[in-house]
Structures are given as structure tokens and as C-alpha cells.
Image (cartoon, helix red, strand yellow):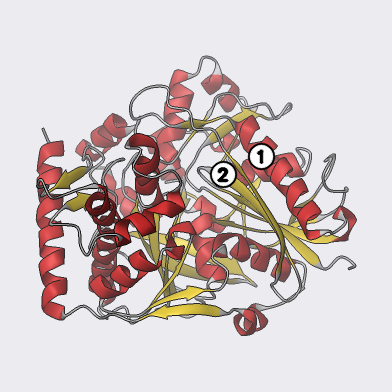
Amino acid sequence: MTKNFILALDQGTTATTAMVVGPDLSVLGRASNEIPQIYPQPGHVEHDPDAIWETTARSARQAMEAAGVAPADCAGVGITNQRETTILWDRDTGRPRHNAVVWQCRRTAEMCRRLKEDGLEPLFRERSGLVLDPYFSGTKVRWLLDHVPGLRADAEAGRVRFGTVDSFLLFRLTGGAVHATDVSNASRTLFLNLRTRSWDPDLLRVLDVPAAILPEVRPSAGVFGTTRGLDFLPDGVPVAGMAGDQQAALFGQTCFEAGQSKCTYGTGAFLLVNTGDRPVASSHGLLTTVAWTVAGETRYALEGSAFIAGAAVQWLRDGLGLIRASADVEALAASVPDSGGAVFVPALAGLGAPHWRPDARGALLGLTRGCGAGQVARAVLEGVAMQVADLAGAMEADLGRPVTELRVDGGASANDLMMQFQADVLGVPVVRPRNLDTTAMGAASLAGIGVGLWNGESLGRMTRIARRFEPVMTAADRRARLERFHRAVALVAEFGSG
């Protein structure tokens, strides 16, 4: 093999995965290493940036060893990442100035509330396509500048660099030579103007963030820089593709046409629909975001973000001890015919779209003496699927047309029971690809385009479907279940309000 494999780096919330992809999109090797979660106090979530880098290097090395390929034969590197997670580091040494503030972190909820009270949310909505929520990078950057001693002075003097995880990894991969991000990640910061696809000075002024710390915004496919000074890749390998994890999954699912949609079930659940070459403003609680820029063409998406999906299964495992491994949840849920009337609202980290209630808390309602571990497990899986159905409903309302098919990926999409229920409550087919790592595949695909290995048309021909789930639930049953779930969500929102 001579310089014709792509190394995809997928830096996620709970683990870093590396995948070696051949010229026919075959997965030649894969490795994953967990990222320690840091919880300094309730509602705060952090990562050690050095641990992010160490797990990236380790996973890359292990994946190439598993594939039996020589690092010198790598044609290019693609990066995808947890998006809004925020890192500030020293320009000269590359050392982090604080732990990474993770997208799940709620520490800026009060700041967001004050900005809303000042009437600023319409400005951010119109310019960035986002809402004022602790989810996004902008208020996290402001918090760090305000709370880390000496950081603001150094930032204003140009001695500090800001980036989402893609930018941090690119800086490290290139030996500090390149400080850049791609347009999809930039669109998750609260700083980017969607129409100009450049940093917006008014938004930066409102958040009191100096422009000097920001990375250069570039297209998603193309050579960002080349590797330098690494112990797992030789110098000179092009880093040729970058996209935020959900946009990378949309690309990896080959949703290249307007109207095509996918949902990724990872730590959270993220539903995106390609809206074509113009941003579509949402009036139903969704986000407008850049999907990618490739070959001079930009595509936009509507996105619905639910903060808890796979994390709910982890809670069953680690918090309640009902299962030993996450994969055990399907068998436990299938051991009973239904949830016994129990309804789960997955608001363990607040409610995301379309509600945007960071103060909301999760709930398990409708319990009886007949509810055991199986019913609870089933209620949790159904709750995750019903919140995705909520997102799809908001998407249909914004687009003025129905979702006709949903492509799915991510670890939890391997759960047949949940995917069948998802098809049932949506009332449309759910399509699962052979390779569930479409986030990493999207990064590989972008990098392959960046170095000329393939194009969009050839990617579409090589993608394979593994299973199609057809809805079997009656329309009346579907309506009844969703109405029950909506009543539970309303109770949770009311409880969170005081």
C-alpha cells in the first residue's frame, strides 16, 4: 500500500477513536481510548486537554497497528470532534491554560440568562443561527477569560489561542504551525456570521472576546497543514479534512442533497437535515448551522440537539447498576413486553432542542409496583427515541414538509429494539448503514477529497446499508405515546422553573 489510506481521528466526549480507511472506504483498523470526565462541581463538566491529545496519539498508533499499515503510507488525516467544547492554550508552548470546558457544561447558564434579559438573543439568532445557551463555545470563552487569573491580559496581548477540539488537535499535529478551524466547527461558537462565514465583530464585542485569539476559518476539505514532530506519523502528512462530529456524520451518511437527514446516537442524539446552499431560520426551536464547505460550495443544515442519549444508558449502568455493560440494555429491555406505563424524560443535562431549558432535570414517571429493571430500561430507550421524534416534528414544521426517511448511526443505533421503536414513533423508515462509525467516516471522506483520493459521487457509490426498519405501530398508538411523553416533558419543565 502506497500513500492510499486515510487516518480518521474522531475525538468524542467519552472516547477518542482512530480509524484507518482504505481507498474503497473499507475500515482496515480501528482503536478507541476513553477520556476521563472531570466534574469540579454540579453542572460543571471538563476534560484535560493533554488527555485529549494523549488518547488521540494512542488511538492513532493502535489503529495503524491493527490495520497492519506503515505510518509512512498515510495519504492524509481527517479530524472530527466534539464541537462546542472550548480550549484556551498558550500560543508559544501549546500548553492549556485551563481544562477544556465541555459542551455539556452548564456553568454559563446565568450568563446566558442575563444576555437574554438584555434582549440580545435575536441578534445571536439572526447572525449565528444559534440560541443563547451554555451549550455553545462563546459564553464558555467569556467565562474562562473572566475567571482564570491573567488569561484576559494574555489573550488581549495575542499570547493565547482559542479553539474547539479540532483546532487544538490541528495545532498539535502541525507542531504549532497552524491555528485554524473549519467552517462547520466555527458555526458552533456563537461568533460566526452564517452568511459571511467569517467571525462577526458585533457578536465578539457583546461577549467581550478579543478577535486575536480566534483561529482562521477554512473550508472542510483541503490541506490545512502537514504533520510535524510527531512520534506516530512522519513529518509532511497532510491534515486534509475537518468537520464537527454531527456535520461529519451527515457527510459520512452521504446526505448530500437538500432534505436528506440523519440522527447520530452518541452521548447525545443529534438530528440534522441538509437544507441546501442557504441557511434556513428555525421558528420551532432548532439551530441553523453550516454543514460543510467542499470544493467552493457551502451546505447548511437544521439541527436538533438532545443532550442525553447514550449517556442515559451509561446512567443505567453506572448510576443505577442495572446493567454491567451498555450493550446489555437491549436484552434487559426486551425481557418485558412494554415499559409498564413508565415514561422517561432524558433531561439529565437539561433539555436541548426544541425546548432549550438548561434548568430542566430528568424524570422517570408513571411507576407502579409492577415496574422492574426491564420496564425501566425499556422506558429509557423509548424516552430517547421519543425526544428524537420531537426533533423530527420541529424539523418538519420548519421545512413545511415531512421527513420521509431517517438515516441513523452512532453506538446506540446498533440497538435493534430502540431503532424499531424509533421507526414506529416517527412513522417513517429508519435506515442503518453497515458502518456505524459514520462520524469518523465523514472525517475520512473529507480528507480523501482534500488529497484527491475520491469525490462525492464515488463516496455515494461505496456506502452500504445494513438494515432498514419499517414502522409497524398504528397511528393512534403513536399519537397516544407521544402525547404522554409531551405531558411528562411539560411537568419536567415546570419543575425546573422553580
Give the SS element for disc 2. strand
Cα–Cα span, label 1 and label 2: 8 Å
Give the SS element for disc 1. helix
Between 162 and 75, the one nearer to me in the picture: 75
Between 90 and 496, the one nearer to me in the picture: 496
Based on the displayed image, in which of its 4 quarters is residue 440 positioned? Answer: bottom right
Left of 189 or right of it: where is 334? left
User: Could you tell me if the residues under marks 1 and 2 are in contact, i.e. CB atoms within 8 Å?
Assistant: yes
Residue 385 pos. (x, y %): 29, 62
Residue occupied by mark 2: 15
Q: Which residue is drawn at 29% across and 36% down?
A: 112
Q: Residue at x 70, y 71 (%)?
A: 26
Amino acid bearing label 1:
Thr
Q: Does residue 487 lie above or below 448 as drawn?
A: above
- Is residue 118 in view? yes
Between 356 and 199, the one nearer to me in the picture: 356
Residue 321 pos. (x, y %): 35, 38
> Does label 1 or label 2 sit earlier along the sequence?
2
Residue occupied by mark 1: 55
Left of 70 or right of it: where is 498? left
Q: Which residue is drawn at 10% across and 42% down?
A: 494
- Is residue 215 in view? no
